[in-house]
């Protein structure tokens, strides 16, 4: 009850303009849809929590805007010829929020803490042998060097270290813990440091005056990251209408994730700026290739040909989205000329393929839910397009938890389904590729495809990986385990006095390199 009351009180204060009088010119105010779960990096977290914590902590590497992992606290990275040893040279002059200098001892301490099961780090299984790789040893030859030894070569080691749900494997000072060993607060190296958390209301961060910024331009979660305001306040405002009104009134400065349907209205307001990019998420129509009807590849090809992707995407994203028939997201560094190729909207070809498949009007049930409105809208529009081509498609609306259970068990024919974003294409393909007998949730059960995917997780050379992803895309278009439609949309909005803010493909708010004017 206390949590609800405080959140309601905050909303009331916003509606009355009550925060305007207390906000200072150097205070950047950012909306949160819900309170954070903790301030313990990579522990008891969700995406909403990551957006706050990653203002305070940094890792050896971080994702750039092209979705590739790049140095952050590391100055350079050397990989051994066999791909099993990674040597990180630390940047000099980096300090923690308590003033201590970053050394290799801090990297070792942080790593050992993450690898202790008692920490309950989200990404422990990615590095202890249960995932793609096992880190067998971590050593520090000197104060500025850290060496990670792996059990085998892995093209995904750096990408896994950089994952936002892992808190970038953020390096912490041991002062982050209390005397009894329990977690206190993140003493990291990020541009902002922890100040206060009023549960259910707000989180306040202060500018870290001694932040060691990289030169150059902003680049995702790495690159230039100077703190340009004295403090950042994340305000919990669950209701989008309340948040939109607060932005227009000037009570808050940034909406990091505005609804697509609100973007056009906000954009028309001369007090507001908008920033829209595509994310790494995938939205499409998935199909059970073992279903008696849909196991016929020509029928699945007919479904792909019957979908007018351009019209559908424009409708469900309010004109903000871009069609993409590739599992490789548009903003990925691996989205090349081959990935730009897709299915052609051709109703005549669709009807011909249906005839060749021997389709006799059998009913096909497409599952959908209303928790994700764009996915539901995609189902409704796709149904009409498929019916026009002669397919008997019905929509069954389920609660999201029920639909997800059906997905996990593989007990469906079709679904309008959203996948959360993966930064590396191998992980995007892995989310849907594999043996159905062992993992019923997998869409694409093809041993040759699986072999290509496994190779992409080992080969580190970007050119060689590109060739693999190109081949996977061609096979995906031919076999159609899913009609991939578009990548998710990240639409942010700010007041006109905010300078330097832009939405990112990570769909996380960014407070660094952002200033306030008049």
Image (spheres, rainbow, N blue to C red):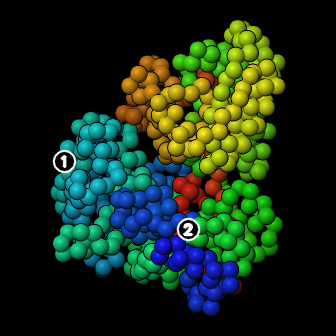
Instruction: Name the residue located 66 percent from the left edge and 71 percent from the top edge.
Output: 243
Where is 101 relative to 468, above or below?
A: below
From the viewer's perspective, tell me whether residue 497 is left or right of residue 68: right
Instruction: Name the residue located 71 percent from the left edge and 12 percent from the top edge.
Output: 359
Of circles 2 and 1, which is in front? 2
Give the CA separation, mark 2 to mark 1: 39 Å
Measured as percent of width and height from the top left, residue 191 is found at 44, 73
Measured as percent of width and height from the top left, residue 333 is found at 54, 44
Of the pair 150 and 378, the residue shown nearer to us: 378
From the viewer's perspective, tell me whether residue 259 is left or right of residue 84: right
Where is 249 relative to 257, above or below?
A: below
Residue 173 seen in render: no
Name which quarter of the figure residue 399 lies in. Answer: top right
Measured as percent of width and height from the top left, residue 266 is found at 76, 66
Quadrant of the drawing holding the C terminus: bottom right
Q: Residue 269 carries which label?
A: none
**Label 1 environment density (alpha carbons within 10 Å; few <14, some 14–19, many ≥20):** few
Name which quarter of the figure residue 75 lies in. Answer: bottom left
State the SS at label 1. strand
Instruction: Name the residue located 57 percent from the left edge and 80 percent from the top edge.
Output: 9
Of the pair 472 and 371, the residue shown nearer to us: 371
From the viewer's perspective, tell me whether residue 311 is left or right of residue 469: right
Of the pair 446 and 441, the residue shown nearer to us: 441
Residue 58 seen in render: yes
Where is 456 relative to 246, above or below?
A: above
Question: What residue sits right under mark 1 in the picture?
Answer: 137
Q: Residue 32 carries which label?
A: 2
Mark 2 or mark 1: whose residue is earlier in sequence: 2
State the SS at label 2. strand
């Amino acid at each position: 009850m206390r949590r609800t009351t405080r959140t309601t009180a905050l909303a009331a204060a916003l509606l009355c303009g009550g925060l305007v009088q207390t906000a200072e010119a150097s205070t950047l105010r950012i909306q949160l849809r819900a309170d954070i779960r903790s301030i313990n990096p990579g522990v008891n977290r969700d995406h909403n929590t990551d957006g706050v914590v990653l203002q305070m902590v940094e890792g050896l590497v971080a994702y750039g805007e092209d979705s590739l992992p790049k140095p952050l606290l590391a100055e350079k990275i050397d990989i051994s010829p066999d791909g099993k040893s990674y040597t990180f040279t630390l940047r000099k002059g980096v300090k923690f929020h308590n003033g201590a200098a970053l050394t290799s001892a801090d990297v070792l301490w942080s790593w050992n803490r993450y690898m202790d099961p008692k920490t309950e780090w989200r990404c422990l299984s990615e590095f202890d042998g249960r995932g793609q790789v096992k880190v067998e040893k971590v050593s520090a030859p000197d104060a500025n060097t850290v060496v990670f030894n792996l059990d085998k070569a892995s093209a995904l080691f750096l990408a896994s270290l950089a994952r936002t749900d892992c808190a970038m494997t953020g390096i912490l000072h041991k002062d982050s813990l209390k005397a009894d060993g329990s977690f206190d607060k993140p003493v990291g190296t990020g541009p902002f440091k922890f100040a206060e958390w009023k549960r259910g209301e707000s989180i306040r961060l202060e500018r870290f005056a001694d932040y060691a910024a990289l030169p150059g331009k902003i680049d995702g979660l790495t690159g230039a990251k100077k703190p340009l305001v004295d403090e950042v306040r994340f305000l919990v405002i669950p209701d989008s209408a309340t948040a939109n009104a607060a932005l227009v009134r000037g009570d808050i400065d940034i909406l990091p994730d505005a609804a697509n349907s609100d973007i056009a209205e906000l954009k028309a307001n001369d007090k507001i700026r908008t920033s829209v990019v595509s994310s790494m998420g995938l939205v499409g129509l998935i199909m059970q290739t073992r279903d008696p009807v849909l196991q016929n590849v020509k029928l699945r090809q007919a479904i792909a040909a019957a979908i007018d992707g351009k019209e559908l995407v424009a409708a469900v994203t309010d004109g903000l989205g871009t069609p993409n028939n590739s599992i490789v997201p548009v903003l990925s560094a691996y989205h090349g000329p081959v990935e730009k190729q897709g299915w052609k909207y051709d109703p005549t070809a669709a009807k011909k393929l249906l005839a060749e498949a021997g389709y006799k009007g059998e009913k096909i049930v497409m599952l959908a839910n209303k928790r994700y409105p764009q996915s539901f809208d995609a189902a409704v529009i796709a149904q009409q397009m498929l019916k026009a081509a002669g397919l008997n498609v019905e929509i069954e609306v389920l609660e999201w938890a029920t639909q997800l259970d059906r997905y996990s068990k593989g007990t469906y024919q079709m679904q309008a389904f959203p996948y959360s974003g993966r930064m590396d294409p191998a992980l995007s393909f892995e989310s849907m590729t594999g043996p159905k007998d062992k993992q019923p949730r997998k869409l694409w059960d093809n041993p040759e495809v699986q072999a290509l995917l496994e190779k992409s997780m080992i080969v580190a050379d970007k050119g060689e990986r590109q060739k693999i992803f190109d081949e996977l895309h061609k096979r995906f278009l031919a076999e159609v385990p899913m009609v991939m439609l578009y990548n998710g949309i990240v639409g942010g909005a700010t007041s006109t006095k905010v300078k330097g803010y832009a939405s990112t493909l990570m769909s996380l708010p960014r407070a660094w390199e952002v200033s306030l004017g008049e």
